[in-house]
Image (tube, helix red, strand yellow):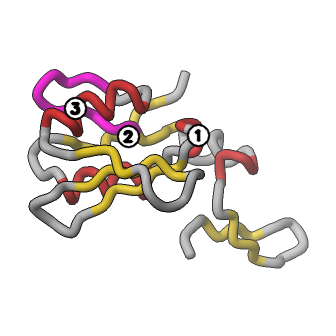
Amino acid sequence: MSGVWFFRNNGVMQLVENPQAEGSEARQGSKRKVLVYLPTGEVVNSYTFLERILIGLGWERYYEGDPDLYQFHKHCSIDLISLPRDFSKFSSVNMYDIVMKNPNVFHVRQVSVS
C-alpha cells in the first residue's frame, strides 16, 4: 500500500493513495513524474512510443492474461512488465518497474506542472 498521509482539520490522519486527485498538487509544488528515454531524452507520453522502444530492446507483447493490462515479456528472462491499459493510469510505480528491468535506458524525472 502506498500513498501520502495527511492530517485533516479534525485531527484525523488519512491515507490518500492518489494525492493529485485530492488537490495536493499545490501543497507539493505542482510536480509530477515522467519516464524519460535516455538515448534521445524524450518523455514517454504514449504506449505506442513505449512499445516501439521496448520491442527494440527485445521485449515482446504478451497477449495472455488480464485484458485490462498491457504486458511485455522477454524470452530470455522471467521478467514481465504489466501496465494499466489506460495510459492516464500509468504511474510512477510502473515507471520504476520499467527502469529496473531496463537499466541505463530509462530514467524517472520529476517535472514542474505549469
| Position in image of residue 88 (x %, y %) | 58, 37
Image: 44 above or below 86:
above
- Percent of width and height locating residue 62: 36, 51
Instruction: Report the Cα–Cα distance between label 2 and label 3.
Output: 21 Å
- For the N terminus, give its image quadrant: bottom right
Residue at left offset 67%, top offset 48%: 24
> Does dot 2 land on a helix, a strand or a loop?
strand
Q: CA distance from mark 2 to mark 1?
A: 21 Å
Dot placed on the residue nearer the N-terminal end, 2 or 1: 1
Left-right relation of 25 to 73: right
Which of pointers 2 and 1 indicates the residue nearer the eye?
1
Q: Which residues are magenta?
A: 34-43
Q: Which residue is labeled 3 in the image?
A: 53
Contact flag, marks 2 and 1 (Cβ < 8 Å): no
Residue 86: image tag:
1
User: Magenta stretch mostly in which secondary structure?
Assistant: strand
User: Of the residues shown, which amino acid type is indicated by label 2?
Assistant: Gln
Does 98 appear in magenta?
A: no
Compute the Cα span from label 1 to label 3.
19 Å
**Residue tagged 2:** 110
Q: Amino acid at mark 3?
A: Ile
Image quadrant containing the C terminus: top right
Residue in the picture at 23% in, 43% down: 107
Is residue 74 left or right of 64 when viewed as pictured?
left
Instruction: Please tell me which residue is depicted at 72% across the width and 47% down the height of the picture.
Output: 21
Q: Earlier in the sequence, mark 1 or mark 3?
A: 3
Q: Residue at x 41, y 53 (%)?
A: 94
In terms of image quadrants, where is residue 26? top right
Q: Depth check: 29 or 67 in front?
A: 67
User: Between residues 5 and 71, which one lies in front from this camera angle?
Assistant: 71
